[in-house]
Image (cartoon, rainbow, N blue to C red):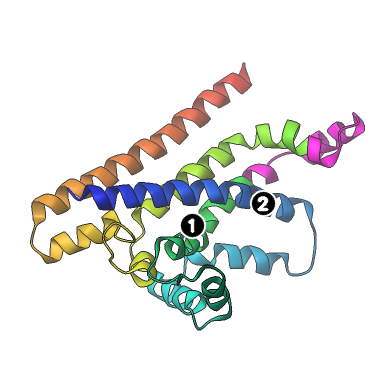
């Protein structure tokens, strides 16, 4: 068992999912409450990582984060470090490829809230921000929990983008998915099996926790 790769994977997944939570809330709120030309294009752009092959997404991210690019060059000039083949670069890439998993569940939850509920809150004297935090956010909590868990699980198991952006640096960018791939290439089936089972259990427990939370919350609402 490669515990160093396990630590990198958990650290990356936690950091990415927690970072994406406010981003997902902001984007979902904006899409629900703002009507503008090009809304469908923006939503499609956010959802694109779901259907884009990881190698294609990884290539564009590699080009965009490289030191010769505008963003990558600016980052290097400020910090003195390159984004490619580093944990920070891996985190940036993770924010992109896990973004739809953070936005879509929250967006769908907010869209199910009847407009009359928001209007009643406004008529009661609540501002739009207070309405969001006191009314909309509690109602959309199942979507928020789903977004948090799905972005965590997806980041934990990503392989293609991680390999292209981070490479295979032990203790820095080597994740469990890459360690499994290396073990298979080395015909170390025992280690590959143990690491695969760990990822399977974590993913299964995470999804079950979301289902149990949403089901128990539905019961409380009915009561």
Residue 58 image position (x, y, % from top left):
42, 72
Circle count: 2
Mark 2 surroundings within 10 Å by alpha-carbon count, few (fewer than 14), some (14 through 19), many (20 or more): many
Residue 103 image position (x, y, % from top left):
59, 52
Residue 3 image position (x, y, % from top left):
23, 47
Residue 195 image position (x, y, % from top left):
21, 48
Measure the C-alpha gap from mark 1 to mark 2: 15 Å
Mark 1 surroundings within 10 Å by alpha-carbon count, few (fewer than 14), some (14 through 19), many (20 or more): many
Q: Residue 199: within the magenta?
A: no
Residue nearest the observer in this picture, 125 or 120: 125
Residue at the image point whose x is 8% and y is 62% from the top: 187
- Label drawn at residue 68: none
Q: Which residues are magenta?
A: 107-130
Q: Secondary structure at mark 1?
A: loop
Residue highlighted by disc 2: 28
Asked if residue 209 is positioned above or below residue 199 in the image, the reply reads above
Labels 1 and 2: the sequence-earlier one: 2
Residue nearest the observer in this picture, 172 or 106: 172
Residue nearest the observer in this picture, 189 or 93: 93
Residue highlighted by disc 1: 98
| Quadrant containing the C terminus in the rendered view | top right
């Amino acid at each position: 068992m490669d515990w160093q790769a396990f630590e990198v994977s958990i650290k990356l997944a936690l950091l990415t999912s927690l970072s994406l939570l406010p981003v997902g809330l902001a984007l979902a709120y904006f899409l629900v409450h703002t009507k503008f030309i090009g809304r469908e294009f923006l939503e499609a752009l956010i959802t694109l990582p779901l259907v884009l092959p990881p190698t294609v997404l990884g290539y564009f991210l590699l080009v965009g984060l490289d030191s010769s690019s505008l963003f990558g060059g600016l980052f290097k000039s400020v910090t003195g470090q390159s984004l490619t083949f580093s944990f920070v670069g891996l985190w940036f890439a993770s924010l992109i490829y896990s973004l739809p998993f953070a936005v879509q569940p929250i967006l769908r939850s907010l869209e199910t809230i009847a407009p009359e509920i928001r209007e009643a809150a406004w008529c009661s004297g609540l501002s739009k921000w207070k309405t969001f935090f006191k009314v909309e956010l509690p109602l959309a909590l199942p979507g928020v929990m789903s977004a948090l868990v799905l972005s965590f699980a997806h980041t934990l198991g990503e392989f293609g983008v991680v390999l292209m952006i981070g490479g295979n640096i032990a203790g820095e960018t080597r994740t469990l998915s890459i360690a499994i791939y290396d073990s298979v290439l080395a015909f170390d089936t025992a280690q590959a099996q143990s690491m695969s089972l760990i990822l399977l259990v974590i993913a299964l427990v995470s999804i079950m926790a979301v289902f149990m939370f949403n089901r128990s919350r539905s019961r409380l609402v009915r009561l």
